[in-house]
Each structure stands twice: as structure tokens, then as C-alpha cells.
Amino acid sequence: MAATKDSTHSGDTPRNPRSATTLAVLGVVAVALFAGLCALGTWQVHRLAWKQNLIAQVDQRAHAPATPAPARADWPALTADNAEYRRVSASGAYQYDKQTLVQAATELGSGYWVMTPLQLADGGGTVLVNRGFVLPEWRKRQAAGGQPAADAAPVKVDGLLRMGEPGNGFLRNNDPAANLWYSRDLPAIAQARGLGEVAPYFIDADAAPGAGRDPTQAPVGGLTTLTFPNNHLVYAITWYALAVMIIVGAGIVAREERRLRARR
């Protein structure tokens, strides 16, 4: 006799519909996830607008004609929003004996930014100037030959205004006692070098006309990064796509629950 199939042991026995409590919990979770993902997507849209405005602003300022560097009376009002990447010009005398080397990595290798105080003409105060990037070989030669003294010869510096960097954040903490510098923390550098009050900004100097690009011989200027990553549109699309997936998933669950209830 042929064996009969026992439907009670069938592997495809349909499950019972979920309880109202379970569905309520799933609904709350789905709504919360949907709202959170939409909020993240909207935040990225706002960030996209901010980044596009920043890029346009930096491009406009960096390629505009140079204007005189902000005077001491203007220092308190300067912020990154209203001043950074402005093209400026300053005149004065370098204090080479008080310059500071700040660790940096550029397309030319790992080395240092050369931050040299510029005593502004007519008693206008002191501004730190990033004269450019050098490799360790340059630093060794400077150490062997001794630091040059302050130079009373007037110089004119053109470059981009940059606001000072705090000593913390993503960078390592500076160690003035050991003369180890990882960020361009202007007040800390001024205190360590006995400069008194300095401008809240420094100048990223342009490359000197006719200068080479050998950072073992002299500071290489004009290396300011003017490109900024802008992935906010991709992030926004990702968050919104995940929100749509929540809706699709909720629709599938709702259809399955209706089907189960219809079969009972």
C-alpha cells in the first residue's frame, strides 16, 4: 500500500498572522527608521548646498586681485566665513630667527611648513607667513648652519589668508617644549617664540617668481589646497534610497499579513 502524506508534518505549513502588538511594534520601528533616514538625506542636501557655496566662494576669493592684509583694527572681526582664502598682500621684514617648522605632508613628500613671522611695516603688528614646504634635508642644513637672524630688508608677500588652526582636533597635540609642531596654532607659536600678539590669520605665500620646486633647497610656496571633496549628493541619494526600501519592506509585510488573514 502506498504511504499517505501526513499534512501535519508538511514543511510548507503556513504560519499564523502576526499579532496586533507585533504589527504595531514593527510599524513604529519602520516609521522611526523612515523618518531618521529622510532626516539624514535632507541634512546631506543642506550640506551639499553649503559645500557648493564654499567651493564657489573659495574660487572667487582665491582668484581675485590681492588686497592689503587686514590691519590690526580688523583682526577681532575676522572669521573663516568672511575672510579665509582671501588673496592678500603684506609688506614688512621677516624674523627668520623666530620661524617655526610645522609637520606636513604634500605632493612633494613628508616634511614641514616654514612659518616665519613678518613684522609688518609702519608698526602694523606681526603676521605669520607660511613661506612654503621643505623636506627634512633643508631642516638639517638649517640646523647645521644655524638659524638666520632677523632681516631688516623689506619684503612683499602675496598669498592666501588662512585662519589659524587649533592645537587639537584631528591633529596631534603640539609640544612647544620639544619644538614639535603638528598644527598651525598661531597663539601657541607666538608664545613659544616670544612674538607677543600676532594676527589671528597667517598667509599662505604664493610661489616666488622663477623659484624652483626643490624643497630640499628652499621653501616651495603656492601649495594651498583649493579643492574640496564633495560627496554629499551621493550620501543624500543613499539615505533616501534606504528610506524607500523601508517603504517597500513595509508594503511587503502588509500584503503578506492580508494574504494570511484572507486564508483563515
Image: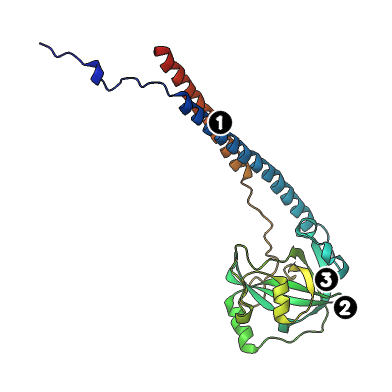
The kind of residue tagged 2 is Gly
Q: Nearer the viewer, residue 87 or 9?
A: 9
Q: Nearer the viewer, residue 153 or 256?
A: 256
> With 41 as the anchor, is 50 left or right in this view?
right
Give percent across and percent down for residue 62. 77, 58
Q: Earlier in the sequence, mark 3 or mark 1?
A: 3
Give percent across and percent down for residue 104. 61, 69
Which residue corresponds to the image point at 52% horizontal and 29% vertical from the top-left?
A: 27
Residue matched to label 2: 123
User: Quarter of the image containing the C terminus?
Assistant: top left
* Vertical comparison of 239 with 202: above or below: above
Question: From this viewpoint, which residue is outermost toward the top?
Answer: 1
Few, some or many C-alpha atoms within 10 Å of disc 1 (few <14, some 14-19, many ≥20)?
Answer: some
Secondary-structure class at tag 3: strand
Which residue corresponds to the image point at 67% horizontal and 45% vertical from the top-left?
A: 47
Mark toward the viewer: 2 or 3:
2
Q: Quadrant of residue 175?
A: bottom right
The kind of residue tagged 3 is Ala
* Vertical comparison of 42 with 258: above or below: below
Residue matched to label 3: 90
Give percent across and percent down for residue 91. 84, 74
Q: CA distance from mark 2 to mark 1?
A: 63 Å
* Vertical comparison of 184 with 15: above or below: below
Give percent across and percent down for residue 105. 59, 67
Q: Earlier in the sequence, mark 2 or mark 1?
A: 2
